[in-house]
Image (cartoon, grey):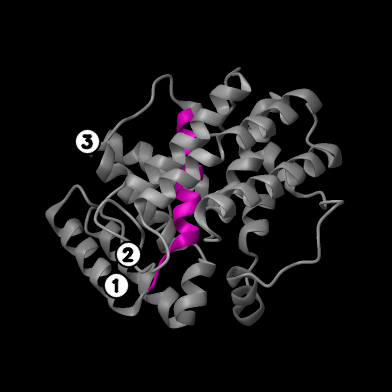
Amino acid sequence: MTVPLAPAVAAPVASPDVLAGKAVRALVDEATLTPKPGLVDGRGSGAHDDMDLDLLLGSAESLRDRFAEMAEAGRRIGVPGPELRGELARIGRAAEARMLRVTGGVNTHRGAIWALGLLTGAAATGSGDVCRTAASIAAHPDPAAPAPALSHGALARLRYGGGGARTEATDGFPHARLAHTTLRRARERGASETQARLDALMAVVASLEDTCLLHRGGRAGLALARSGAREVLRAGGTATPAGRARLAGLDAALAERRLSPGGSADLLAAGLYLDSLDSPSPHRS
């Protein structure tokens, strides 16, 4: 299912604290959205043995000051070049270290730090299209990058190919924009805010080469999740009884196989962040 992407998002003039608050709110809204197949939500831990909703919420709050630092760096430097790339990377490593201290070593938000950090830094520059500016920042190498670690996502990319989080960023966050578009379209059709957000998640799962799914389930697991998400959307989304029935079926299938679309969740949070930049008042479920 192909959905035209939303128009470019130009960030309003906002203080670093306001932009950081929007980033944390996006993480909280993603975490609390229920029911999310395979993911931590208000019902429980999904396919995860090492995290729950309280841990995700604590992790999100722990990142507030680091997101504010990223916004301040974007405001101060103002140009999406190598200097800003290096500064965002430095702050991002500090954010990840803070997250791991708060969670006792559990990786709750590494992908979200990358995506929301770039978008927050980009939004603060005032350079126009937030996603395009973020892509320009991500195109530069991190001058102080440590030796790459073989994360689950990196291992999945080595085994199955695909660009992963870096390609998503350098391409201008197409899946975050897809989530944003789907949110808007679902609201226009009369969906509730929860239904619109679930539809946005399904749109991302249906399209993304999610390395979390690849790591846990290989190509078969990714295909299962994608096809299930497409069935939800083809049935009219979660605002319809048929769509909700298919969502429940996908939930059961992912739970049985311990599959989690964690990369899609990060990009839903990024889409919610774009939506918060593009909306005069926050949407609440």
Q: Earlier in the sequence, mark 1 or mark 3?
A: 3
Mark 1, Cα crowd under 10 Å, few <14 / some 14-19 / many 20+, is: some
The quadrant the N terminus occupies is bottom left
Q: In what element is the residue under mark 2?
A: loop
Q: Is the magenta stretch mostly helix, strand or loop?
A: helix
Residue 255 numbered mark, or none: 1
Magenta-tinted stretch: 259-276
Q: Name the residue under label 2.
A: 46
Asked if 85 appears above or below 144 in the picture, the reply is: above
Residue positioned 33% across, 63% down in the render: 229
Asked if 241 appears above or below 225 in the picture, the reply is: above
Mark 2, Cα crowd under 10 Å, few <14 / some 14-19 / many 20+, is: many
Q: Kindly report which numbered mark, 2 or 3, lies closer to the viewer in this rendering.
A: 2
Question: Can see residue 91?
Answer: yes
Question: Can see residue 127?
Answer: no
Image coordinates of residue 76 in percent, x first then y, are: 78, 24
132 sits to left or right of 2 = right
**Residue 100 in magenta?**
no
**Residue 272 in magenta?**
yes
Amino acid beneath label 3:
Gly
Q: Quadrant of residue 148?
A: bottom right
Image coordinates of residue 13 in percent, x first then y, are: 61, 17
Q: Which of 45 and 263 is in front in this view?
A: 45
Q: Which of marks 2 and 3 is nearer the N terminus?
A: 2
Q: In what element is the residue under mark 3?
A: loop
**Mark 2–mark 1 contact, CB under 8 Å?**
yes
Amino acid beneath label 2:
Gly
Mark 2 and mark 3: Cα distance apart in space: 28 Å
Q: Name the residue under label 3.
A: 190
Amino acid beneath label 1:
Ala
Mark 2 and mark 1: Cα distance apart in space: 7 Å
Mark 1 and mark 3: Cα distance apart in space: 30 Å
